[in-house]
Amino acid sequence: MIKAVRVHQVGGPEALVYEAVDVPPPGAGEVHIRQHAVGLNFIDVYFRTGLYKAPSLPFVAGNEGAGEVVSVGPGVTDFHPGDRVAYYSNLGAYATERNIAADRLVKLPDHITYEQGAVLMLKGLTVWYLLHKTYKVEPGTRVLIHAAAGGIGLIACQWAKALGAHVIGTVGSPAKADLALANGCDQVINYSKEDFVARVKQITRNELCDVVYDGVGKSTFPGSLSCIRPRGLFVSFGNASGPVPPFPLAELNNHGSLFATRPKLNDYVAKRSELIEGADTLFSAVLSGKLHVPINRAYALKDAARAHTDLEGRVTTGAAILKP
């Protein structure tokens, strides 16, 4: 028996139940890992509340983690007991141990900690595809990153700056503004005190941004569209304030023939070759010093409900983990 945090019925943080569960030996193509750290993400909230539907109930929450290989199932040749590994995979992460498909695992470089690995796989790979695949950020690209002091935001600001972009971020408090400025933002807009659309126009001298990365959703839309230059790109990749409401496609025309996309990580790492490309690029950026991955909060696995309460209450900044 191992310990895990399961959801029996979707709902609030109280739906997260810390309990003993059975884990069978790894099956064909699977690896059994003992986890050292688990990433905390808003997507975990979406599954817990039912905004994203889990395949079945009950389910073990969580989508990213890192640990060491304990044993491998039949047919697994790339991993061995003792290997340090990390992963992003839908559900199952909030546990002391777990089985996972070997083709979803990557090996952790020696100088990247389990804690860093646990927050890099979802957040870091998300930033990788956003900046390298969804829109190729280059020197001189003007980007607007909402929730710039969040777990994804801080990595995105650092990486976009390292790529030569002009980085504008939005935050909700002076403390978060300081954090975003220290992590690559050229300008930070406190949307609780300022009209972010007016400030973007002022900062860019009405030239606006090439791309807006919006993980907030309802409360930043449609303002985000007003921050994008003609033929620029609106990237809606999260719903922290609720989903973006349906809108007429003519709105994209009204703002200058804009493009819009609603991407998800699964579609960018569907092939193992894509997963390896993303992980290699990500780890190289960390090891070269382009990206720093501070862990700002750590919770015991049994306190997952409190962690979710803090996450939804916008108490957390940067990356946070659960410790099994």
Image: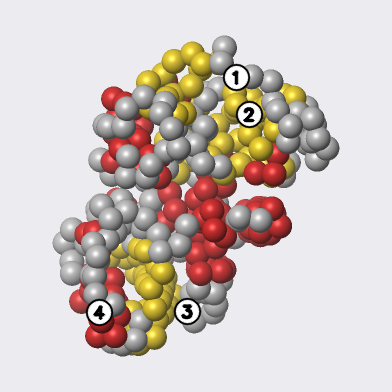
- Between the C-alphas of marks 3 and 4, the distance is 23 Å
Nearer to me, 145 or 277: 277
The reply to whether residue 177 is visible in this rendering is no
Nearer to me, 37 or 194: 37
Residue 141: which disc? 3
Using a 10 Å C-alpha cutoff, classify the residue at mark 2 as few (fewer than 14 neighbours), some (14 to 19) or many (20 or more).
many
Residue at 48% x, 21% y is: 4
Residue corresponding to mark 4:
251
- Between the C-alphas of marks 3 and 1, the distance is 48 Å
Amino acid at circle 1: Val
Residue 182: which disc? none
Residue corresponding to mark 1:
23
Question: Where 4 falls versus 45 (above or below)?
Answer: above
Horizontal placement of 71 versus 8: left or right? right
Q: Position of residue 156 (x, y in %)?
A: 47, 60
- Between the C-alphas of marks 4 and 1, the distance is 50 Å
Sequence-wise, the earlier of marks 3 and 4 is: 3
Sequence-wise, the earlier of marks 1 and 2 is: 1
Residue at 51% x, 41% y is: 90
Using a 10 Å C-alpha cutoff, classify the residue at mark 1 as few (fewer than 14 neighbours), some (14 to 19) or many (20 or more).
few
Tell me where residue 210 sits by quadrant.
Answer: bottom left
Residue at 24% x, 75% y is: 248
Sequence-wise, the earlier of marks 3 and 1 is: 1
Q: Position of residue 80 (x, y in %)?
A: 80, 31
Sequence-wise, the earlier of marks 4 and 1 is: 1
- Between the C-alphas of marks 2 and 3, the distance is 42 Å
Q: Nearer the viewer, mark 3 or mark 1?
A: 1
Q: Nearer the viewer, mark 3 or mark 4?
A: 4
